[in-house]
Amino acid sequence: MNLINIAQETLHTEAMALQKAASRLDQNFLDAITLICNTKGKLIITGVGKSGLVGAKMAATFASTGTSSFFLHPTEALHGDLGMISKEDALLAISSSGESEELTKILPHIKRFNIPLIGLSSQKTSSLGQYADVFLDISVEKEACPLGIAPTTSTTLTMALGDALAIALMEKRGFKEQDFASFHPGGSLGKKLFVKIKDLMRTSNLPIIHKDTTLREAIVLMSEGKLGTVLIVDDKEKLIAILSDGDLRRALMQKDFSLEEIALNYASKNPTCYTNTELLASEALKIIENERIQLLPVTDQAGKILGVLHIHDLVNAGIKSK
């Protein structure tokens, strides 16, 4: 028994089913899109067993891509949860046979309230197919399961068709990256589009020294500040230089090195800084990477330090520049 061959055959079987399904998409698919777009309420998805699991995933995909949606188990619907469906909602029901007992029992009640119904089934003549206002074919020639019993190819196709509906709806509604991020504020995209410098910059206990401070004193503050850097300001508290641990290592190589020398003599003058605290953190990370620095000072228009943004804070927050 070659398990690799079995796995490959499974993938080929399911891939072929998807290709065939793609080729038979017709006006019914467009009608389903129109029905969902015209729905003033929510798109409710229902199904039993594996179809129910696929339906729950589809509901999550719809909800995160701009189509208000939730999953309702037909058994729960029969015992009171039908009240969760309003006349402004639409129902998308999944059943490969179209005859799942729990599902078919709620269909008459759905139609009694004139709720639009999209049916996903392999049988147009089934109960689900007959009740549906729009019928979408999820038939497959065979399951990938060698016994032809376990839902495999059919569930893959159903899930893919749900994705196709969601993506088509995104396009029709002009759903943008910013919209997606609004539903995923905790994800990497949400962080990229919404987290700003002011949300992450450090503003207290900053290692700031006067321009006349000695290197000895600067090193002590650098250690206490735990940023590997000290910020140097002039008499008006304007940022004029930064002394980093890299600057300190280079200073050690000089023949006239002295701890009693003022730190400014070894520091990097006119450091890169930023004044717009509304700048996206992802953009700040690009600046840090392009300038090959670890610390980005944030100042007001007069050059006074408001805070600092360290590359480690950005990385720990999950901010990415790309």
Image (cartoon, rainbow, N blue to C red):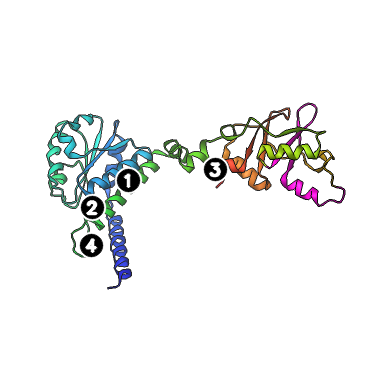
The amino acid sitting under disc 3 is Asn
Which residue is drawn at the image coordinates 54% and 45% (left, top)? Answer: 320
Q: Which residues are magenta?
A: 228-256
- Residue topped by disc 2: 138
Numbered badge on residue 165: 1
Q: Residue at x 73, y 27 (%)?
A: 302
The residues bearing labels 3 and 1 have C-alpha atoms spaced at a distance of: 36 Å
Q: Earlier in the sequence, mark 4 or mark 2?
A: 2
For label 4, the crowd category at 10 Å Cα-Cα, with few meaning under 14, some 14 to 19 and many 20 or more, is: some
Nearer the observer, 296 or 36: 296
Alpha carbon separation for disc pair 4 and 1: 26 Å
Q: Which residue is mark 3?
A: 316
14 in the magenta segment: no
Marked residue nearer the N-terminal end (3 or 1): 1
Q: CA distance from mark 2 to mark 1?
A: 13 Å
Q: What secondary structure is marked by label 3? A: helix
Amino acid type assigned to the residue bearing label 4 in the image: Cys
Left or right, 307 with respect to 114, comes to right
Amino acid type at mark 2: Ile
**Left or right: where does residue 88 sit relative to residue 180?**
left
Amino acid bearing label 1: Leu
Instruction: Quadrant for residue 151, please give it.
Output: bottom left
Instruction: Select label 4 or label 1 by which is in front.
Output: 4
Label 2 secondary element:
loop
Q: Earlier in the sequence, mark 2 or mark 1?
A: 2
Instruction: First in sequence, mark 3 or 2: give its number.
Output: 2
Dot label at residue 145: 4
Q: For residue 173, which quarter of the picture? A: top left
Viewer-nearest of discs 4 and 3: 3
